[in-house]
Amino acid sequence: YTRREFESCLQVQERIVQLQPESPAEWRDLGVLLLLTGRPIRASEVLKQLLQDFPEFSDRNSVEGYLKQAREELVQMIK
């Protein structure tokens, strides 16, 4: 996928989250797309909130991995 395609996907995913705010998988996907489109700050916010709001989410380990990746990207941006 190209960055432009990920941007389009991000717009769709933001709408899906509005329609299904109770779905942790949709929030996870939003966080991933934010990472893929170079928005680690917002991705980190979304993923942290996901873990807080859905502590029993079955894909928690993946979310924690994406959150770690977002933090690493933030560190790289600061350097």
Image (cartoon, grey):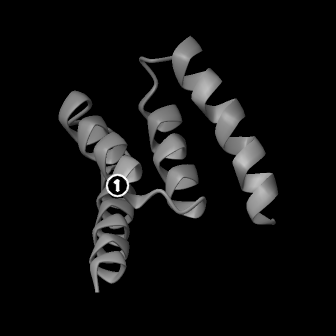
Question: Residue at 18% of width from left, 35% of height from top?
Answer: 52
Q: Which residue is mark 1?
A: 41
Question: Residue at 71% of width from left, 31% of height from top?
Answer: 12
Q: Amino acid at mark 1?
A: Ile
Query: Which percent across, then down, holds residue 60?
Result: 31, 50
Query: Which percent across, then down, holds residue 50?
Result: 30, 37
In the rendered image, the quadrant that contains the C terminus is bottom left
Query: Which percent across, then down, holds residue 66?
Result: 39, 62
Q: In the image shown, does 12 or 23 lie closer to the viewer? A: 12
Q: In the image shown, does 76 or 28 lie closer to the viewer? A: 76
Query: Which percent across, then down, holds residue 74?
Result: 31, 70
In the rendered image, the quadrant that contains the N terminus is bottom right
Question: Residue at 37% of width from left, 74% of height from top?
Answer: 73
Label 1 crowd bin: few (<14), some (14–19), many (20+), radius 10 Å: some
Residue 68, by quadrant, is bottom left
Vertical arrangement, residue 73 with respect to residue 38, above or below:
below
> Exactly how many numbered labels are in the figure?
1
Question: Residue at 77% of width from left, 43% of height from top?
Answer: 8
Vertical arrangement, residue 13 with respect to residue 37, above or below:
above
Residue lying farthest front? 78
